[in-house]
Image (cartoon, rainbow, N blue to C red):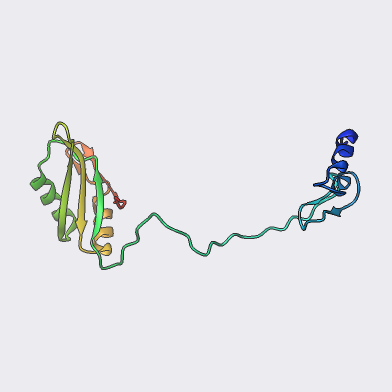
Amino acid sequence: EPNQDRINERKTMKLFGTTAASLVGTRVSSRLSSPVFYRHDQPQEVATYKYVPAYRPTNEYIAPKSMPFTLHVYNIPRSISRKLFLDLVSKRVNEPIFHCNFVNDRERNVFLGVAYVRFKDEESGKRAMKALDGMQIGDLIIGANVAKRQY
């Protein structure tokens, strides 16, 4: 139940006018178009709208089909050489590899077991991802994902 002293105090306020009476009475609108108050025990109509933004900025770059496609290959054995890795990948994938970037630690200059392999288009990159994901080199099983764009 509403506090009567607080309601009477609000009735005297010039800003609210008679709108404070609506907390205990029926629906009353203020001098302004909003706000509209309802009693707490009365059911309120809730209008649901679906928000559809006119412009939704995306932080994900969607490349055209004809552009080069890069895979993030991880869990590569650290002892493998770049030439041997490229030979293994090209035999397994049967697609031309445009570029391969081995990731090294900046301070120690040690291979971290991660490579970025670029293919000519998205279709060949997807086929390569299916072929490389789960491939075993030595005692490690390598994984392949679509590389996220670096800004």
Residue at the (15%, 61%) spot, across then down: 96
Q: Residue furthest bottom?
A: 66
Q: Within the image, what quadrant is residue 143 found in? A: top left
Q: Is residue 129 left or right of residue 58?
A: left
Residue at figure coordinates x 16%, y 51% from the top left: 100
Q: Which residue is nearer to you in this view: 78 or 111?
A: 111
* Residue 114, image x, y percentages: 22, 42
The x, y position of residue 42, in whole percent, is: 86, 49
122 lies left or right of 103? right
**Drawn side of residue 99 relative to residue 11, left or right:** left
Question: Front-most of 89 and 78?
Answer: 78
Toward which corner of the image does residue 4 lie, by quadrant? Answer: top right
Percent across and percent down for residue 38 are 83, 49
Residue drawn at x 18%, y 35% is 105
Q: Taking 45 as reference, is 115 above or below it?
A: above
Which residue shows up at 13% across the image and 46% down it?
85
Which image quarter is the N terminus in? Answer: top right
Q: Quadrant of residue 93?
A: bottom left
- Where residue 112 appears, x then y in whole percent? 20, 37
Residue that protrudes farthest toward the top in the picture = 108
In terms of depth relative to the viewer, which is nearer, 48 or 77? 48
Q: In this view, does 42 lie to the left or right of 68?
A: right
The number of numbered badges drawn on the structure is: 0
Q: Is 42 situated above or below 119?
A: above
